[in-house]
Image (tube, rainbow, N blue to C red):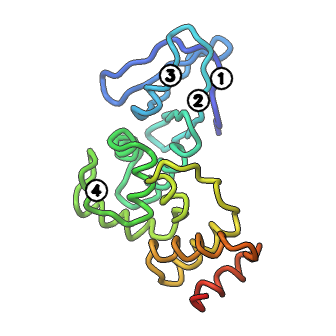
Amino acid sequence: MIAYLHGTLVEKRLAPSPAAAVIDVGGVGYEAFVPLSTFDALPRAGADCRLLVHDYVREDQHALFGFATEDERNLFRMLQDVSGVGPKTALSALSGMPVRLLKAALAEGDAKALAKLPGIGKRTAERICVELKGKIDPLAAAAARAGEPEDALPQAVRDAAAALVQLGRPEEEAVRAVREIAARPDAPADTAAIVRLALAGR
């Protein structure tokens, strides 16, 4: 399986859809389909280029999908795991909304926002919300929507927020609770203790 390509960018194109990049790696030209966010991040032709890759192999198809960031690739793979969502639909979704807002929409189960994406209708958006519920870190999503760095809080705090959502707490409430606990001078350092404090309302 190919994890990434690193070589010389030979060509980048928007048409025919989807957008694609061709990278020369040791004399072999690899074509990778890319979302628009990655296309915008590509250098000029002839420059050094590195793309993270999802290697898609089926009986009747072998295609490479390229991404500028791990976030893009992770979201692509998550969307592809949803029944009825293929790679081209997942790529279109990534092209239709900034990554940080897509991540927030998935975390919040915002089917209305997802239904506006190209290739995703109301039914598919609802299915995505059901099948991906709880798979996006709620603190990361809140940070993404606010334009803040995701790693601003310790991993234990982020895990506690995710655990609270899994236990049925609304995402906004879970995020607020763990943020308040993390801000204390005597804040516990382990996930279980943070979850217990949040459940106890302390």
Q: Amino acid at mark 2?
A: Leu
- Viewer-nearest of labels 3 and 2? 3
When the figure is inspected, residue 119 is found, relative to residue 111, above or below; the finding is above
Residue placed under numbered mark 2 in the picture: 51
Q: Amino acid at mark 4?
A: Ala
Q: Are marks 2 and 1 in contact (CB under 8 Å)?
A: yes
Q: Are marks 1 and 4 in contact (CB under 8 Å)?
A: no
User: Which circle's residue, 2 or 1, is located before the other in the chain?
Assistant: 1
Measured as percent of width and height from the top left, residue 171 is found at 46, 73
Residue placed under numbered mark 4 in the picture: 113
The furthest residue to the top:
46
Residue placed under numbered mark 1 in the picture: 6
Q: Alpha-carbon neighbours of circle 1 within 10 Å: few (<14), some, or many (≥20)?
A: some
Name the quadrant containing residue 157. Answer: bottom right
When the figure is inspected, residue 96 is found, relative to residue 47, above or below; the finding is below
User: Which circle's residue, 2 or 4, is located before the other in the chain?
Assistant: 2
User: Which circle's residue, 3 or 1, is located before the other in the chain?
Assistant: 1
Mark 2 vs mark 1, CA separation in Å: 7 Å
User: Which circle's residue, 3 or 2, is located before the other in the chain?
Assistant: 3
Mark 4 vs mark 3, CA separation in Å: 27 Å
Mark 3 vs mark 2, CA separation in Å: 9 Å
Mark 3 vs mark 1, CA separation in Å: 12 Å
Q: Alpha-carbon neighbours of circle 4 within 10 Å: few (<14), some, or many (≥20)?
A: some
Q: Alpha-carbon neighbours of circle 3 within 10 Å: few (<14), some, or many (≥20)?
A: many
Q: Alpha-carbon neighbours of circle 2 within 10 Å: few (<14), some, or many (≥20)?
A: many
Instruction: Out of 38 and 188, give the one closest to the viewer.
Output: 188
Residue 135 is marked as none
Label 1 secondary element: strand
